[in-house]
Amino acid sequence: MTRNVHAHKVLNQLDVNPMDEAGLRDWIAQEFGDDVVFHTCKLQDLSVDALFTFLQEHHKVLVNDGIWSLNKEKICQH
């Protein structure tokens, strides 16, 4: 069964533990399983790849020297 998770779960993890993309993919697989899909306030059924694209295009994450971290200025507060 596919698990549907809000993108904030990933962002919250990056807030406490910035990591590279491979580490983040591993964490997602361990935490939510391989069949996870994500949703945001406006989007549904995002794959991990689509979620990563969304996070980068909307500047929700900062990537410096390959390490992903939360961009707190771009996070909605709910």
Image (cartoon, rainbow, N blue to C red):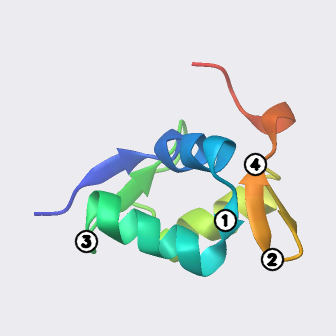
Q: Residue 48: give x, y in percent of width and height.
A: 48, 70
Answer yes or no: is residue 47 visible: no
Q: Report the Cα–Cα distance between label 4 and label 2.
A: 15 Å
Quadrant in the picture for residue 61: bottom right
Q: On the image, numbered disc 2 is attached to which residue?
A: 66
SS at badge 2: loop
Q: Residue at x 80, y 35 (%)?
A: 72
Kind of residue at disc 4: Lys
Q: Which mark is residue 19?
A: 1
Kind of residue at disc 2: Gly
Tell me which numbered mark, 3 or 4, is placed earlier along the sequence.
3
Q: Residue 63: give x, y in percent of width and height.
A: 83, 66
Q: Residue at x 53, y 36 (%)?
A: 41
Q: Are marks 1 and 2 in contact (CB under 8 Å)?
A: no
Q: Residue at x 83, y 53 (%)?
A: 59
Q: Report the Cα–Cα distance between label 3 and label 4.
A: 23 Å
SS at badge 3: loop
Instruction: Give neighbour class at mark 2: few <14, some 14-19, many 20+ (Cα, 10 Å).
Output: few
SS at badge 4: loop
Mark 4 or mark 2, whichever is nearer to me: 2
Kind of residue at disc 1: Met
Q: Quadrant of the N terminus?
A: bottom left
Mark 1 or mark 4, whichever is nearer to me: 1
Q: Report the Cα–Cα distance between label 1 and label 4.
A: 15 Å
Q: On the image, numbered disc 4 is attached to which residue?
A: 60
Instruction: Give neighbour class at mark 1: few <14, some 14-19, many 20+ (Cα, 10 Å).
Output: some
